[in-house]
Amino acid sequence: MSLLRSVCVFCGSRPGLRPAYVAAARGTGELIAAQGWRLVYGAGDVGLMGEVARSAMAAGGRTMGVIPTHLLAREQGRRDLGQFVITEDMHERKKVMFMNSDAIVVLPGGAGTLDEFFEVLTWRQIGLHEKPILLLDTEGYWQPLIALIDHSIAEGYAEASMRDYFTAVPDVAALGERLRAALS
Ligand code: AMP
C-alpha cells in the first residue's frame, strides 16, 4: 500500500518581477506531480499560486486547494482541483492546509506568504509539529528574511535553534532532494 505524501506550498498571489520566480513555481508544481505527491495550496489561480497548480495539474499531479470564502472572487479560486475546500476565514485555511500536509514549501511572496511562513515557524518553535519547512530561495529572494531572523537571534529574541526549524534551498533540484529525503 502506498502512502500519499502531501506538500503544502505557500507562495505569492502575484507573479513577482523576475521570470525566475515563475519558472521556480512551475518547476515546483512539476516536481510535486512527478514524485506522486499531492499539492496542497491556496487554490488561487493568480500569481505563483496559479503557476504551481497549473503545472502540477498539467503533469497529472494530485491537488488540494483551500480558500476562504471572501477570497474566492479575488484570487479566482479554481475548482477543477482534486479536492477543493472552502473555509470560513484565513485562520482556518492555514490550519487546513497545514493539517493536510507532510512538508511545507515557501516560494517567493509578499505579506500573506510571510504570514503563512511565520505561522508554521512559530508552531514549530513551540513544539507543535516537526514538519520540514523549506524556503525556495530563488535568486536569493529570502536572504533578507534570513538575515532578519539571524538578527532576532543575535539580539536575544529567539533561540539559535530557530535556524534549525527551516532550510533554505537555492533551486527546485535541491528542493526535490530535501523533500525526497524527508518524505520517503
Ligand atoms: P501574498 O504573498 O501577499 O501574495 O499572499 C499569498 C497568500 O497569502 C495568498 O493565499 C493570500 O490569500 C494570503 N494572504 C494575503 N494577504 C494575507 C493576510 N493579510 N494575511 C494572511 N494571508 C494573506
Image (cartoon, helix red, strand yellow):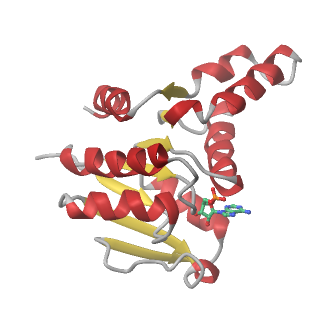
Q: In front here: 34 or 90? A: 34
**Above-or-below relation of 162 to 25:** above
* Residue that extends furthest to the right in the rendered view of this protein: 155
* Residue that extends furthest to the left in the rendered view of this protein: 1
Q: Residue at x 57, y 56 (%)?
A: 12
**Above-or-below relation of 72 to 29:** below
Q: In front here: 40 or 96? A: 40
Residue 28 location (% of width, % of height): 35, 46
Q: Residue at x 48, y 54 (%)?
A: 99
Q: Is residue 61 visible?
A: yes
Q: In front here: 73 or 25? A: 25
**Above-or-below relation of 44 to 121:** below
Q: Is residue 137 visible?
A: no
Residue 76 location (% of width, % of height): 50, 80
Q: Residue at x 46, y 48 (%)?
A: 19
The total number of labels drawn is 0
Residue 7 location (% of width, % of height): 38, 47
| Quarter of the image where one finds residue 121 | top right
Which quadrant of the render holds ligand 1? Answer: bottom right
**Above-or-below relation of 139 to 150:** below
Horizontal relation, residue 35 to residue 5: left or right: left
Q: Residue at x 39, y 47 (%)?
A: 23
In which quadrant will I find the C terminus? Answer: top left
Horizontal relation, residue 60 to residue 96: left or right: left
Residue 49 location (% of width, % of height): 47, 61
